[in-house]
């Protein structure tokens, strides 16, 4: 497939040297006759105002968006630009990096492959979370990793009645609930005791946080299911958090509706990714051989 001719860059706002790396990246791309697009925040800080585009033009014009940071930066980029269905390439400036494709030290090698069209596309399920009060929408957001309903300021547990496609599952008494995509199954959901889900599967995971009933366990449902969570007495307030980055207050009686989003996150992949090898590397799993132990008939 042909390489992109117009590339947008999203920069982590807090990582050290991120803006310096952005400047190097812009120079490298422009030397190869690639048109570069920047958000206002980045363009003003590196004094490249001529490259600034508003969100709509940025999303419509970019053939590829580079997320320069970590997985959090890529999640934010996915939420903002999923409606434009632009492929994303993550360049990792450090940290765990499940989603980011290449380390900053190898960005030139990686981008050469992209510009030559040597890449594959991978699509990831996203969620749409909506808060309703008296059946009217108050807030709505996309999520790539997870939607978390948790305690706000009080140390007390919260109670929330949970339905899946209209069927009552239970009323959880817990510190919260993580509703995650397969992509997010290795994030907060994993810390809450949820299962690791292969990203090719299109399912949704419900993982209660510190449930006060031993019988409560994580639940995997279909991507076509619609989840509704209602905050119940004596809980007065909770917090709805999207990808660990943006939060909305939740009050008693309000309904949180979570379903498969209309959009998917499109990721650029430069080579075949072996999911379980990534888990071994990122999670520090030991005692596991990456190579298959299956023995063919001729080897027996």
Image (cartoon, rainbow, N blue to C red):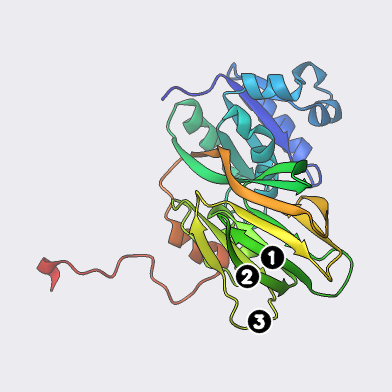
Name the residue rendered at 57%, 74% in the picture: 217
Name the residue rendered at 75%, 70% in the picture: 159
Viewer-nearest residue: 236 or 211: 236
Label 3 residue SS: loop
Tag 2 or tag 3, which sits nearer the N-term?
2
Count neighbours of disc 2 (C-alpha within 10 A) and say few if under 14, some if 14 to 19, many if 20 or more.
few
- Residue bearing mark 3: 213
Q: Are marks 2 and 1 in contact (CB under 8 Å)?
A: yes
Count neighbours of disc 3 (C-alpha within 10 A) and say few if under 14, some if 14 to 19, many if 20 or more.
few
Tag 1 or tag 2, which sits nearer the N-term?
1
Which quarter of the rendering shows the C terminus? bottom left
- Residue bearing mark 2: 170
Name the residue rendered at 55%, 39% in the picture: 264
Task: Please say whether residue 240 is visible from this viewpoint.
Answer: yes
Label 2 residue SS: strand
Q: Do the residues labelled 3 and 1 touch (CB within 8 Å)?
A: no
Viewer-nearest residue: 55 or 234: 234
Label 1 residue SS: strand
- Residue bearing mark 1: 161
């Amino acid at each position: 497939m042909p390489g992109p001719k117009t590339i947008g860059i999203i920069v982590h706002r807090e990582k050290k040297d991120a803006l310096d790396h952005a400047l190097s990246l812009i120079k490298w791309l422009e030397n190869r006759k690639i048109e570069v697009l920047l958000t206002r925040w980045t363009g003003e800080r590196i004094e490249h105002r001529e490259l600034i585009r508003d969100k709509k033009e940025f999303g419509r014009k970019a053939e590829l968006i580079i997320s320069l940071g970590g997985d959090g930066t890529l999640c934010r980029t996915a939420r903002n630009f999923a409606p434009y269905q632009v492929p994303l390439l993550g360049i990792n400036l450090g940290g765990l990096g499940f989603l980011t494709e290449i380390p900053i030290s190898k960005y030139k090698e990686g981008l050469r492959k992209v510009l030559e069209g040597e890449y594959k596309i991978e699509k990831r399920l996203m969620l749409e979370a909506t808060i309703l009060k008296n059946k009217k929408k108050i807030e709505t957001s996309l999520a790539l990793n997870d939607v978390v309903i948790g305690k706000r300021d009080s140390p007390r547990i919260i109670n929330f009645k949970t339905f899946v496609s209209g069927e009552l599952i239970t009323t959880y008494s817990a510190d919260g609930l993580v509703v995650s995509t397969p992509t997010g199954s290795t994030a907060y959901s994993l810390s809450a005791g949820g299962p690791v889900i292969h990203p090719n599967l299109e399912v949704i995971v419900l993982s209660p946080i510190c449930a006060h009933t031993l019988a409560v366990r994580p639940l995997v449902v279909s991507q076509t299911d619609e989840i509704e969570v209602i905050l119940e007495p004596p809980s007065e307030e909770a917090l709805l958090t999207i990808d660990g980055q943006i939060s909305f207050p939740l009050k008693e009686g309000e309904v949180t509706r979570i379903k498969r989003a209309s959009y998917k996150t499109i990721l650029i992949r430069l080579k075949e990714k072996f999911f379980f090898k990534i888990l071994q590397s990122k999670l520090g799993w030991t005692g596991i051989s990456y190579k298959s132990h299956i023995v063919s008939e001729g080897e027996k």
